[in-house]
Image (cartoon, rainbow, N blue to C red):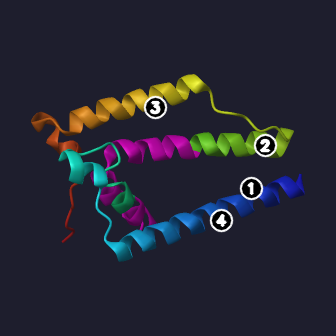
C-alpha cells in the first residue's frame, strides 16, 4: 500500500511539473491557437493555456472567464481522478474510464465549440478580467 501511495504522489508531482514546463514553453514561443488561425473561430480549447496559468496563480475567476467549460470539466475530472486514486490505493485496481463518458465529453466539446462562436453566446469566449 505504501508503494501505491508513493506511485500516486510521484506520478501527480511529475504530471504537474510537466504541465508547468509545457505552459512556460508556450509562453516563450508565444503560441497562438492554430485552429483559430486557420478557421477564424474559437475552438473548445481556446483560452485553456491562459486558464491553467491563472489556476497556477490562484486566479480562479479569471481562469473561469478564459474557458468556462474546461474550468468546470477540470474540477469534475479532478474529483474523478481522486476517485481513481482511492480505488487504486485501497484495492490495487486500475479502473479504465467508461467509453460512454468519453463519447459524451466529446459531444459536449463539439456543442460548446459551436455555441461559443455564436454572437448570442459571446460570453463563452476567452475574456480578460482586469482587477482594480
C-beta proximity under 8 Å, tags 2 and 1: yes
Q: Residue under circle 4?
A: 14
Q: Could you say which is closer to the camera, residue 26 or residue 121?
A: 26
In this view, the mark in front (3 or 2): 3
- Binning the other alpha carbons within 10 Å of mark 1 as few (below 14), some (14 to 19) or many (20 upward) gives some
- Give the spatial CA distance, label 1 vs label 4: 10 Å
Q: Position of residue 127 (x, y in %)?
A: 21, 56
Q: What span is in magenta?
A: 52-78
- State whether residue 42 is above or below residue 98: below
- Binning the other alpha carbons within 10 Å of mark 3 as few (below 14), some (14 to 19) or many (20 upward) gives few
Q: Residue under circle 1?
A: 8
In this image, 46 relative to 13: left or right?
Answer: left
Q: Residue under circle 2?
A: 88
- Binning the other alpha carbons within 10 Å of mark 2 as few (below 14), some (14 to 19) or many (20 upward) gives some
Quadrant (top left/top right/bottom left/bottom right) for the C terminus: bottom left
- Give the spatial CA distance, label 2 vs label 1: 9 Å
Instruction: Identify the mark nearer the N-term, 2 or 1.
Output: 1
- State whether residue 124 is above or below residue 63: above
Q: Residue under circle 3?
A: 105
Amino acid at each position: 500500500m505504501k508503494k501505491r501511495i508513493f506511485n500516486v504522489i510521484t506520478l501527480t508531482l511529475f504530471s504537474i511539473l510537466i504541465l508547468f514546463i509545457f505552459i512556460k514553453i508556450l509562453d516563450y514561443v508565444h503560441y497562438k491557437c492554430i485552429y483559430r488561425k486557420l478557421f477564424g473561430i474559437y475552438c473548445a480549447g481556446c483560452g485553456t493555456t491562459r486558464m491553467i496559468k491563472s489556476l497556477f496563480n490562484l486566479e480562479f475567476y479569471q481562469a473561469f472567464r478564459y474557458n468556462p467549460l474546461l474550468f468546470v470539466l477540470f474540477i469534475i475530472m479532478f474529483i474523478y481522478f481522486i476517485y481513481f486514486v482511492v480505488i487504486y490505493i485501497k484495492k490495487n485496481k486500475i479502473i479504465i474510464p467508461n467509453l460512454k463518458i468519453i463519447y459524451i465529453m466529446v459531444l459536449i466539446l463539439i456543442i460548446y465549440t459551436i455555441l461559443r462562436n455564436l454572437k448570442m453566446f459571446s460570453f463563452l469566449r476567452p475574456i480578460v478580467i482586469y482587477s482594480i
